[in-house]
Amino acid sequence: MATKDNWSATKYDTNANFVPILGATILGMLDPKPNETILDLGCGDGVLTKDLEKICERVVGVDASPNMIEKSKDLGCKDARVVDGHDLAAWFDNENIEQHIGGKFDAVFSNAALHWMKKNPKDVIAGVKHVLKPGGRFVAEFGGYLNCADVHGALIAALNRRGKDGKAYSPWFFPSDIHYKALLEEQGFEVQTISLNPRPTELPTNVAGWIETFGFTFLAALDTDEERRAMVEEIAEHMKITHQREDGKWFIMYNRCRFIAYKPKAYRRYKEPVILKLMGLSASTPLTPEQMSAAKSKVEEIIANNKVAVFSKSYCPDQSHYAAYCRRAKEAIKAITSEFFVIELDQVDDGAAIQDYLQQKTGQRTVPNIFINQKHVGGCDDLLSLKSSGELQKLLA
Ligand SMILES: C[S@@+](CC[C@H](N)C(=O)[O-])C[C@H]1O[C@@H](n2cnc3c(N)ncnc32)[C@H](O)[C@@H]1O
């Protein structure tokens, strides 16, 4: 069943055009680069999405409101889609977005939208992580604790006075910076910065226009237009004492939460010297199905998230030539690119399980076991012959 779209792009333009204009701060924090692919989450009518398009190679805007997406297309946004922020991961996988954009996103940007994604903020954050590249960033501004507290409180109180549970009609989630940081970290993000920023905001019209544009869930609690009008007038009458300046202009106190958080790189980047930390690597010890399944997930994640993945050993107790092959292979790659990931199987607890799974997957038990662009290349000799034919340079370009 189609759900009602309460967002009106016309009202938004009339009563809330300050939202994208004031988005310049968070756009600056995003610091987009021309070669980046960016997802604008909750892109609305596309004003900021268009600004991003002027800078970046590829921008995809998503928003739950068909009305807003239609407006963003009218504005000329090249790739704008109706997607609920809670369903990002499913959308990305089911619609083959990775293929469409040629990888995962370099950054997810969001202005003034996350506080609307109240149903399950954890799902939203997990979805953002899913669509980002390892090392990709999530940069957003949204309503934090005490955002628009006066009008928010007035709407709740007005419904309470009418015998309703006003709080239950609030569509917003206004967390503190401390709480949102914990949510980001819980989902595996590394938070570089997060803060709450009070911002007195001049309204282009008045508080009635603001409520009509943003307070539709509260208005929907009432049965008739007359009741709705009466409630809005009552709130405006009460708020004008404190929120209408001497020149007649209306202000609301916003409190914006701004943050920059990173999806961690999957595994450490190759760097020398390697510190030897030997762990038991006896492949003869039978592995449990759980260990094998964990090893499988880890291997597949490493391969999926890295252009070049090298399963290596820094030291082989009884077959030191394998360690030498690993060293030669890493040096050959390093001569062309520093962008590659190495996992030293003798330095991790699950090295034996990983080696078993690699054997199952590729038929090759020896190390190095190398993947480029998610394809199995083989060992050191295979890599070196690709290098002498000039293929390796092309693959790594
Ligand atoms: C205040 S507007 C901000 C729009 C735009 N980012 C800007 O800066 O002008 C909030 C937007 O969040 C969208 N939104 C609300 N809930 C959403 C959800 N669950 N998933 C995706 N978008 C959502 C709304 O449709 C609306 O376009």
Image (cartoon, rainbow, N blue to C red):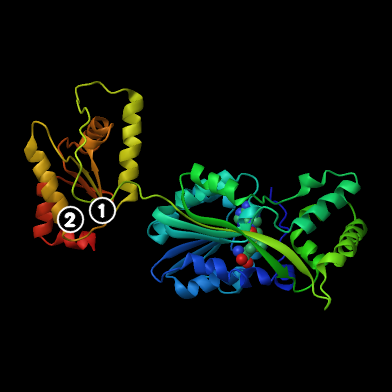
Residue placed under numbered mark 1 in the picture: 340
Q: Quadrant of ligand 1?
A: bottom right
Q: Is residue 65 visible?
A: no
- Residue linked to disc 2: 333
- Mark 1 vs 2: CB contact within 8 A: yes
Residue 15: image location, x then y, percent? 74, 70
Which amino acid, by three-letter code, is at mark 2? Ile
Residue sitting farthest toward the bottom: 247
The earlier-in-sequence mark between 1 and 2 is 2
Q: Residue shown at 54%/55% (left/top)?
A: 194
| Residue 386 is at least partly visible in this image | yes
Q: Residues within 10 Å of mark 1 (few under 14, many from 20)?
A: many
Q: Position of residue 340 (x, y in %)?
A: 25, 53
Q: Position of residue 237 (x, y in %)?
A: 90, 64
Q: Which mark is residue 309?
A: none
- Report if the beta carbon of the residue with label 1 is closer than 8 angstroms to ligand 1: no
Left or right relative to 56: residue 24: right
Q: Residue 395's quadrant in the figure? A: bottom left
> Considering the numbered disc 1 on the image, is that residue within a helix, a strand or a loop?
loop
Relative horizontal placement of residue 141, taking residue 162 as reference (left or right):
left
Q: Amino acid at mark 1?
A: Phe
Q: Please name the residue shown 13% across and 55% down the image.
A: 332
Label 2 CB sits under 8 Å from any ligand 1 atom: no
| Nearest to the observer: residue 343 or residue 197 | 197
Q: Nearer the viewer, residue 396 or 232?
A: 232
Secondary structure of the residue carrying tag 2 is: helix
In the image, residue 196 above or below residue 360? below
The residue at the point 8 percent across, 34 percent down is 319
Q: State the image coordinates of residue 285 (x, y, percent, origin top left).
A: 22, 21
**Mark 1 and mark 2: span between their CA atoms?**
8 Å
Q: Rate crowding at label 2 as few (under 14), some (14 to 19) or many (20 or more) other CA atoms within 10 Å.
A: many
Q: Quadrant of the C terminus?
A: bottom left
